[in-house]
Image (cartoon, rainbow, N blue to C red):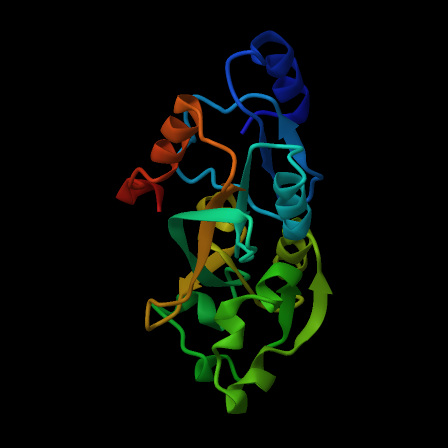
């Protein structure tokens, strides 16, 4: 995604052509643009920090579309899921778990957890059996995913994060990411909009782009 400055400049030049889009990204405030990008880069899914603010902006008609993970069900909102993103156990490359092909809930017994607030409130953790939830009590918790990654890099513990958030660090061998064994640990990504606001052709095309399959090499 382009920077806030670029988005603002693009808005001034093309505001008459498209609707408005609100998304949240880790370690940043809301990026508000009066344009809908021509295409969404694969693996560039928005990472929300303040999901409720996106919902409120759409409900208040401040923006036409919102991109969120863990969409809230509200009577006036339409929710269009476009992807389920895999959650990974993230650790330092020299951590013993980094050598595992997969991990299980019981396999993290005794680990120190660094929590991202969004994951802490996710359906993923709420689905963990009661007798295993104590395994995921954090020693540190942050609202920003970047802070979680920095703590894990320093060896402060392990974390559970969406795969795309740590792709760069894993490629540079700064962090290691291990999938969960059952393969069902995912988070929903969705575009939201008011039910009473018709979608323009540009908005409909944008949603179609979001739903395009992600190439395997980008996973």
Q: Is residue 183 left or right of residue 160?
A: left
Q: Is residue 24 left or right of residue 130?
A: right
Which residue is nearer to you in this view: 99 or 169?
169
Q: Residue at x 51, y 43 (%)?
A: 192
Percent coordinates x, y for residue 140 in the rendering: 72, 68
Does 174 sit above or below residue 19? below
Which residue is nearer to you in this view: 111 or 66?
66
Q: Residue at x 57, y 25 (%)?
A: 2
Percent coordinates x, y for residue 20 in the rendering: 58, 27
Which residue is nearer to you in this view: 109 or 83?
83
Q: In which image quadrant can residue 151 be found? A: bottom right
Q: Is residue 219 left or right of residue 116?
A: left
Confirm whether residue 173 shows in the render: no
Percent coordinates x, y for residue 87 in the rendering: 45, 61
Q: Residue at x 67, y 46 (%)?
A: 56
Confirm whether residue 205 shows in the render: yes
Q: Residue at x 50, y 79 (%)?
A: 108
């Amino acid at each position: 995604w382009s920077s806030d400055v670029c988005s603002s400049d693009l808005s001034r030049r093309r505001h008459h052509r498209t609707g408005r889009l609100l998304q949240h990204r880790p370690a940043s405030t809301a990026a508000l643009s009066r344009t809908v990008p021509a295409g969404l880069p694969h693996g560039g899914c928005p990472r929300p920090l303040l999901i409720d603010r996106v919902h409120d902006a759409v409900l208040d008609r401040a923006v036409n579309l919102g991109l969120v993970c863990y969409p809230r069900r509200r009577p006036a909102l339409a929710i269009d899921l476009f992807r389920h993103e895999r959650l990974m156990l993230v650790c330092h490359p020299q951590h013993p778990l980094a050598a595992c092909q997969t991990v299980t809930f019981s396999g993290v017994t005794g680990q120190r957890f660094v929590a991202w607030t969004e994951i802490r409130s996710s359906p993923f953790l709420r689905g963990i059996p009661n007798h295993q939830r104590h395994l995921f009590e954090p020693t540190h918790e942050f609202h920003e995913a970047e802070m979680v990654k920095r703590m894990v890099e320093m060896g402060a513990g392990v974390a559970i994060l969406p795969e795309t958030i740590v792709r760069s660090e894993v490629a540079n061998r700064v962090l290691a990411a291990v999938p969960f064994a059952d393969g069902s640990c995912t988070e929903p990504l969705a575009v939201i909009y008011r039910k009473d606001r018709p979608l323009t052709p540009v908005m409909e095309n944008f949603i179609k782009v979001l739903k395009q399959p992600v190439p395997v090499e980008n996973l």
